Image (cartoon, rainbow, N blue to C red):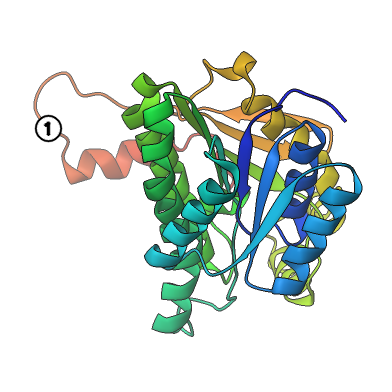
């Protein structure tokens, strides 16, 4: 057992399985008291028992964080049991695969509600406690899919929104000693190992959207246990000046992403005409792009 998070209280949503479970165990091993959350009581309780088995302290909370009231109850239950809340990891997520022409309103609403609204809900109820104590760590889960995912635009939308949410929250709370960062994990989970996900990758490969090397890499993701060290680090005092960042984590690889302009065209006098853009855009803005 370590002590990097000694006396800290951590709440991890969607922590009954996969990455969430790995994060909960890792934080408990570093001394944090942990509140686990899942929609399935069996999985949440199992993680509590695992944490107790390594000498840690944990509670479980059954509930859907996409519901504003439920998220409030989750935060309040954590505080009632442990006295405060220092760390929030928004990890809960779902997926409903469908091309945009077959996607139902219900599926769109559910996916975006769990990922994006669920993250907001928990932050909204947790940040008051963190502001009062002038210390807090919020970590939101985005995805490489924020740049687009075949047959899953709802998931892509939610994960892209989480980046904007994280950066906005980081600005709102920075003066209170609270940081908010996001991370995009790649790991072997129920989602990445599902037959649906494998079928999607096969479609991408068959259509030429990804290379054979990329296909094989995506079909063999690293284990969830590779993810937590970065999150534990971001929750320490040593990471107090890291705020509003987006990380990528895949096995032994850790990246930090930065939005930047790729190519530009500038006209010194007057505004662009359509004829000029027809001529210049392919050559200047997309030069070197494969046809």
Residue 221 point in image, percent of width and height: 83, 52
Q: Would residue 167 be found to the left or right of residue 194 on screen? A: left
Would you place residue 288 above or below residue 12 in this image? above
Please name whichever residue, 202 or 264, is drawn nearer the observer in this view of the structure: 202
Residue name at image x 67 percent, y 60 percent:
60
The answer to which of 33 and 271 lies nearer the viewer is 33
**Does dot 1 land on a helix, a strand or a loop?**
loop
Q: Residue at x 27, y 41 (%)?
A: 277
Q: Position of residue 173 (x, y in %)?
A: 36, 29
Q: Quadrant of residue 266?
A: top left
Name the one closer to the observer, 263 or 125.
125
Query: Furthest residue to the left?
Result: 270
33 left or right, relative to 110:
right
Q: Going by the image, does 96 lie left or right of 18?
A: left
Structural crowding at the residue carrying mark 1, measured as other residues with C-alpha within 10 Å and reported as few (<14), some (14–19) or many (≥20): few
Is 3 rendered above or below residue 238?
below
Residue pictured at 82% horizontal, 36% vertical: 29
Task: Count all numbered tags in the image, as a single digit.
Answer: 1
Q: Which residue is mark 1?
A: 271
Determine which quarter of the picture holds residue 54.
top right
Who is closer to the viewer here, 184 or 115? 115
Does residue 186 appear anywhere in the picture? Answer: yes
Quadrant showing the N terminus = top right
Q: Which x, y percent locates residue 197?
A: 73, 69
Residue 137 sits above or below residue 125 on the image: above
Residue farthest toward the right in the current orientation of the protein: 53
Q: Is residue 210 above or below residue 130?
A: below
Q: Position of residue 155 (x, y in %)?
A: 53, 63
Write down the quadrant of residue 178 in the picture: top left
Q: Which residue is drawn at the image coordinates 35% and 36% (left, top)?
A: 168
Q: Is residue 190 visible?
A: no
């Amino acid at each position: 057992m370590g002590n990097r998070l000694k006396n800290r209280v951590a709440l991890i949503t969607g922590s009954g399985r996969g990455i969430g479970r790995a994060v909960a165990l890792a934080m408990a091993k570093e001394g944090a008291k942990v509140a686990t959350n899942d929609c399935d009581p069996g999985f949440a309780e199992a993680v509590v028992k695992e944490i107790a088995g390594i000498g840690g302290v944990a509670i479980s909370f059954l509930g859907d964080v996409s519901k504003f009231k439920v998220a409030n109850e989750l935060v309040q239950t954590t505080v009632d049991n442990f006295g405060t809340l220092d760390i929030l990891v928004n990890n809960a997520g779902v997926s409903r695969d469908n091309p945009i022409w077959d996607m139902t309103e219900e599926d769109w609403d559910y996916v975006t509600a769990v990922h994006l609204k669920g993250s907001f809900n928990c932050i909204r109820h947790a940040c008051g406690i963190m502001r009062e104590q002038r210390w807090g760590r919020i970590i939101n889960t985005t995805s490489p899919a924020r740049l687009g995912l075949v047959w899953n635009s709802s998931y892509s939308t939610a994960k892209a929104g989480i980046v904007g949410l994280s950066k906005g929250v980081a600005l709102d709370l920075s003066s209170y000693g609270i940081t908010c960062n996001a991370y995009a994990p790649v790991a072997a989970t129920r989602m990445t190992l599902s037959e649906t996900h494998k079928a999607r990758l096969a479609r991408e490969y068959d259509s030429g959207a990804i290379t054979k090397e990329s296909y094989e890499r995506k079909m063999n993701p690293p284990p969830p246990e590779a993810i937590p060290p970065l999150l534990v680090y971001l929750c320490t005092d040593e990471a107090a000046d890291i705020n509003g960042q987006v990380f990528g984590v895949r096995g032994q690889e850790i990246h930090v992403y930065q939005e930047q302009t790729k190519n530009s065209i500038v006209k010194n006098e007057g505004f662009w005409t359509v004829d000029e853009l027809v001529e210049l855009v392919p050559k200047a803005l997309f030069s070197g792009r494969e046809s």
